[in-house]
Image: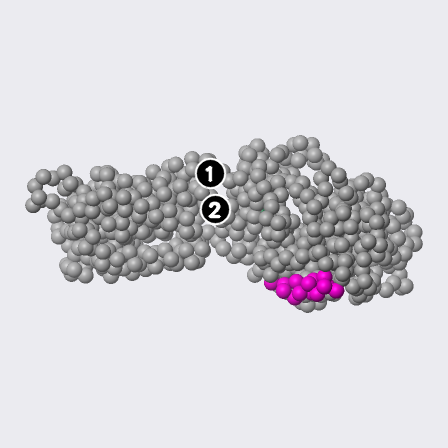
C-alpha cells in the first residue's frame, strides 16, 4: 500500500485544466470560421489550412529535434499558429507561399525564442508579416467567394490579374482617399462600404480566408469566453477602442469614413480581437495590462485604417503591441491586498 | 471509538517554543496530566489524553518537521474515550463569572492553540495588549478547505459551547463586538447559532454573518475582508487592525478549559476523500496515528494515491502512516489519482504560457508566476520586489495553473530561503 503513496508540495488537487486543453478549446473556437471558409472558398480553404497546420507542426517537431528538446506538438500551439496563419492569408495564395510562411512563423516567430511561452511576437502574425513583405502582390489579391463565381481562378505568379474583387476595406480606403479628389465623378462614397454589412456579417465578400464571416468568428469568440479559455478584457478593449475611434471618424465626415459597425466586422478585427490579440503568451499578464494592450491594438488598427497607407491594420498593431508587452507588464505591477508589506 | 493502544504526542505541536518534557520513561500518567511544559510566553503546554505509561521520549515522524521528539504513551485498560461536554452548556451560561485573568490562565494551562491550522498559542492572542487593543472578534465558522467538515459538525453539535467560548474571548479582551462568520452553503449552522444566541441572554450582542462560499474564505484575512470590509496589511496579522479571529473548534476548547478546567487533548478530525472507504468525523486524541484513524474510517480504497494531513490545498502529503495527529490536525484527506489529476500525479511541468490565471486567482493579489520564476532562478530580491511576503500560501495559483507549475511550492521555498538569508531560520 505504502509504495503507491505519493508526496509532493501542496496543493494536492488541480483544476484538471492544462495548456493542451486551452489550446484545444481555441481550435474548437476556430471551427465555425473554418466551416465558413470552406463554404465560401471551397477546396482552397481546406488545402491552405491543411498545408499551414502540417508545415507548422513539422517545423516545430524538426526544431525540437535539432535542439534535442522534447517534442512539444502535444500542446497544440503549433496547430493553432497554422490555422490562424491560414485564416489570415488570401484564399488564392499558392501552396508554396503558405509553406514558406508557416516555416517562418514557427522557426523565427517561436522556436528561436525558445518555444511556447518564450516568444515575444505572435508567431502567426510574424509569418503573415513575412509573406506580406515578400509577396506583397499575392497577399493583396482577393478572389471572389465561390458562392458568387463557381470557377474561382487559381492565381499564380504569372497570372495575378485573375478575377478578383476589392475587399470592403479597400472600398472604405478609397472613400477616405477620395476626400482629396476634386473631380466629383471619381469620388467614392463611404456608403458603398456601409451597404456591405450583410455580406460582412455572413462572409460573402473578398478577404482573408478565415476572417470574412463575422458571425462564425463571433460564435467562436463566445465559445472561448464561455469556456473560460480567454478572459473578456482584451476582446472588449480591442472592440471598444476600435468602435470609439471609428465613431469619431464617422461623425466627422460620414461620406469619407465608414460606419463603426462596418469597421468592427471588416478585415481582421474580429479574428484579431478574439483569437490573435488574446494569445496569452504575447499579451500582458494582468487585467490592467490587458486593457492597455487591447486599447492599443484596437486604436492602432483604426489609426492605420483611417490615416495610414494600408487598408488593414490588425497585423501591425498586434505585432507592435506584442513588442511593448514586457513594458506594459513592468508598469502594471500589482499591489497586494492591504498595501505594500513593510519588509 | 476505542482508545488507541499507543499515542505519540509531539513536543512541538504549534507555532512557538517547543515544550520541555516533564515526565520520564516508565512514569505512570493519567488523562489530562501535564507531560510537556511551556516555559516561553509564545508556547502551549501539552497533556496526556489517556491513562497509561510513558514508553519512551523519542523521535517520531512529524507531519511538518520531518522527524521530531514526541512523548510516546502506552494506554492501559482503564481508559474510556473522552466524551465532548457540549450538552453541559445552555442558556444559563454567563461569562461574567470569570475574570480575564482566570480565562487567560485557564487557556494557557489547557494548552490551547489555534485549531484551524496555524496553531498559534491562543493564550497569547487573548492577552490584552494596551498598545493594540482588540475591537472586534470574529469566530471563524468557514471551513478552511474543501472536503473538511469537522468545523461544520462542531457548529451544529456544540453550538452553545462555541458561543460560550466566543463570550469568554470577548470577556478576556474586554471586547463586545463579536461576529460569527459562516459560509452560505451551511444555512443549518447559521440557524443553529441564531437559535443559540436567542437562548443565551449573555450572547445577545453576537451577530451571525453569512458569507459567500469560496476558497480561501476561511483564511483569516479573507474573512475579515468579507465581514468588515477591511484589509489586513500585506504580510501582517489581524491584531494590527484590532481584530482577533478564532476558529469554532478553538472557541469550543476555550469554553471547556475555562468552565471545566479540561486541557486540550482531544479534537474533532475529518477523515475524508475518495480514497477513504467510510468518510466521517472523529473525536480523536492528540497523538493518535494517522493510519489508525484511517482504519476507523474503513481503511483506504484500492485507488488511494495520496494521504494528506490537513486539507487538499494547504495540507502536507504524508509518507509514513504512523505519523501522529497534533492539536492543529483538523483533517486527514486521502485522494485518488482522479482527484489529483493526471499531470499533477506525474509532476509534469510545462512552460508558463503567461495566461495570467495564477494572478487572477490570487486572493491577496500578488504575481505568483513572476515570484516563482524568480525563486527558481534564485533571484530572491526580485521575488521580494513582487511582494513575495504577502503570499498566504493558499495554493490557488498552483491549483489553476494550466502548465502545472508548483507556483506556491516555489513561493514557500523562496520564503524559507529569505528567512535563512536573514538568519531568522537555521539551515
Ligand atoms: S499561494 Fe499563490 S494564490 Fe495563494 S496567496 Fe500565495 S501567491 Fe497568491
Ligand atoms: S497560471 Fe501558470 S501558465 Fe498561467 S501565467 Fe501563471 S504560471 Fe504561467
Where residue A117 sits in the image (x, y, percent)? 44, 43
Q: Is mark 2 within 8 Å of ligand 2?
A: yes
Circle 1 residue: A332
Chain on which label 1 sits: A
For image coordinates 29% across by 60% down, the residue present is A35
Where residue A186 sits in the image (x, y, percent)? 9, 44
Q: Is mark 1 within 8 Å of ligand 2?
A: no
Circle 2 residue: B356
Local secondary structure at mark 2: loop
Q: Is residue A241 magenta?
A: no
Locate the C terminus of chain B by quadrant: top right
Q: Residues within 10 Å of mark 1 (few under 14, many from 20)?
A: some
Q: Is residue A317 left or right of residue B157?
A: left
Where residue A244 sits in the image (x, y, percent)? 31, 46
Which one is nearer the viewer's eye here, A167 or A154? A167
How many numbered dots are placed on residues in this image? 2
Q: Which residues are magenta?
A: B185-199
Of discs 2 and 1, which sits in the foreground? 1
For image coordinates 20% across by 44% down, the residue present is A253
Amino acid at each position: 500500500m505504502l509504495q503507491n503513496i505519493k508526496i509532493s508540495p501542496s496543493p494536492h488537487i488541480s483544476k484538471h485544466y492544462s495548456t493542451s486543453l486551452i489550446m484545444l478549446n481555441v481550435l474548437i473556437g476556430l471551427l465555425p470560421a473554418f466551416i465558413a471558409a470552406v463554404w465560401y472558398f471551397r477546396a482552397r480553404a481546406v488545402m491552405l489550412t491543411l498545408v499551414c497546420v502540417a508545415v507548422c507542426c513539422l517545423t516545430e517537431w524538426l526544431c525540437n529535434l535539432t535542439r534535442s528538446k522534447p517534442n512539444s506538438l502535444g500542446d497544440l500551439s503549433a496547430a493553432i499558429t497554422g490555422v490562424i496563419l491560414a485564416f489570415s492569408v488570401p484564399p488564392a495564395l499558392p501552396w508554396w507561399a503558405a509553406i514558406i510562411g508557416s516555416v517562418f512563423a514557427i522557426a523565427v516567430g517561436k522556436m528561436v525564442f525558445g518555444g511556447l511561452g518564450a516568444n515575444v511576437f505572435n508567431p502567426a502574425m510574424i509569418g503573415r508579416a513575412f509573406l506580406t513583405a515578400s509577396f506583397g502582390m499575392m497577399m493583396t489579391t482577393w478572389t471572389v467567394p465561390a458562392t458568387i463565381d463557381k470557377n474561382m481562378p487559381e492565381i499564380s505568379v504569372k497570372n495575378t490579374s485573375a478575377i478578383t474583387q476589392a475587399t470592403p476595406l479597400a472600398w472604405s480606403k478609397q472613400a477616405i482617399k477620395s476626400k482629396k479628389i476634386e473631380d466629383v465623378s471619381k469620388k467614392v462614397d463611404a456608403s458603398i462600404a456601409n451597404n456591405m454589412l450583410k455580406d460582412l456579417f455572413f462572409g460573402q465578400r473578398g478577404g482573408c480566408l478565415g476572417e470574412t464571416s463575422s458571425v462564425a468568428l463571433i460564435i467562436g469568440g463566445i465559445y472561448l469566453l464561455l469556456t473560460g479559455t480567454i478572459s473578456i478584457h482584451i476582446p472588449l478593449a480591442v472592440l471598444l477602442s476600435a468602435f470609439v475611434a471609428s465613431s469619431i471618424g464617422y461623425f466627422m465626415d460620414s461620406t469619407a469614413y465608414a460606419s463603426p459597425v462596418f469597421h468592427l466586422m471588416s478585415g481582421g478585427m474580429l479574428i484579431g480581437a478574439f483569437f490573435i490579440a488574446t494569445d496569452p503568451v504575447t499579451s500582458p499578464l494582468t487585467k490592467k495590462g490587458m486593457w492597455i494592450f487591447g486599447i492599443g491594438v484596437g486604436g492602432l488598427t483604426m489609426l492605420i485604417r483611417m490615416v495610414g497607407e494600408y487598408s488593414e491594420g490588425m497585423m501591425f498593431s498586434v505585432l507592435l503591441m506584442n513588442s511593448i508587452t514586457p513594458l506594459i507588464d513592468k508598469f502594471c505591477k500589482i499591489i497586494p491586498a492591504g498595501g505594500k508589506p513593510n519588509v | 471509538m476505542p482508545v488507541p493502544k499507543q499515542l505519540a504526542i509531539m513536543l512541538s505541536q504549534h507555532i512557538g517554543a517547543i515544550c520541555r518534557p516533564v515526565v520520564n520513561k516508565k512514569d505512570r500518567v493519567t488523562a489530562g496530566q501535564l507531560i510537556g511544559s511551556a516555559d516561553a510566553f509564545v508556547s502551549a503546554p501539552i497533556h496526556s489524553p489517556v491513562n497509561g505509561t510513558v514508553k519512551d521520549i523519542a523521535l517520531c515522524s512529524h507531519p511538518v518537521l520531518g522527524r521530531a521528539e514526541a512523548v510516546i504513551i502506552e494506554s492501559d485498560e482503564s481508559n474510556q474515550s473522552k466524551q465532548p461536554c457540549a450538552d453541559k452548556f445552555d442558556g444559563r451560561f454567563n461569562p461574567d463569572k470569570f475574570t480575564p485573568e482566570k480565562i487567560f490562565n485557564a487557556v494557557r494551562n489547557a494548552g490551547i492553540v489555534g485549531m484551524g491550522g496555524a496553531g498559534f498559542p491562543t493564550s497569547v492572542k487573548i492577552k490584552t495588549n494596551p498598545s493594540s487593543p482588540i475591537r472586534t472578534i470574529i469566530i471563524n465558522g468557514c471551513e478552511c478547505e474543501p472536503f473538511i467538515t469537522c468545523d461544520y459538525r462542531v457548529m451544529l453539535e456544540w453550538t452553545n459551547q462555541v458561543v460560550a467560548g466566543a463570550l469568554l474571548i470577548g470577556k478576556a479582551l474586554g471586547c463586545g463586538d463579536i461576529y460569527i462568520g459562516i459560509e452560505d452553503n451551511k444555512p443549518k449552522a447559521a440557524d443553529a447559532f441564531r437559535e443559540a444566541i436567542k437562548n443565551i441572554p449573555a450572547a445577545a450582542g453576537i451577530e451571525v454573518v453569512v458569507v459567500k462560499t469560496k476558497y480561501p474564505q476561511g483564511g483569516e484575512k479573507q474573512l475579515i475582508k468579507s465581514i468588515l470590509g477591511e484589509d489586513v496589511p500585506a504580510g501582517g496579522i489581524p491584531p494590527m487592525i484590532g481584530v482577533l479571529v478564532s476558529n469554532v473548534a478553538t472557541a469550543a476548547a476555550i469554553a471547556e478549559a475555562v468552565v471545566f478546567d479540561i486541557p486540550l487533548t482531544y479534537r474533532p478530525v475529518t477523515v475524508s476523500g475518495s480514497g477513504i472507504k467510510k468518510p466521517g468525523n472523529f473525536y480523536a486524541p492528540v497523538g493518535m496515528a494517522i493510519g489508525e484513524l484511517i482504519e476507523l474510517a474503513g481503511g483506504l480504497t484500492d485507488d488511494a494515491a495520496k494521504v494528506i494531513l490537513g486539507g487538499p490545498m494547504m495540507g502536507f502529503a504524508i509518507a509514513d502512516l504512523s505519523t501522529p495527529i497534533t492539536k492543529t490536525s483538523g483533517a486527514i484527506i486521502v485522494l485518488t489519482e482522479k482527484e489529483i489529476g493526471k499531470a499533477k500525479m506525474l509532476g509534469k511541468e510545462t512552460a508558463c504560457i503567461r495566461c495570467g490565471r495564477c494572478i487572477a486567482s490570487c486572493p491577496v493579489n500578488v504575481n505568483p508566476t513572476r515570484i516563482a520564476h524568480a525563486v527558481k532562478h534564485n533571484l530572491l530580491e526580485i521575488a521580494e520586489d513582487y511582494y513575495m511576503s504577502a503570499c498566504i500560501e493558499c495554493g490557488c495559483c498552483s491549483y489553476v495553473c494550466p502548465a502545472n507549475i508548483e507556483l506556491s511550492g516555489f513561493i514557500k521555498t523562496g520564503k524559507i530561503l529569505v528567512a535563512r538569508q536573514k538568519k531568522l531560520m537555521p539551515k
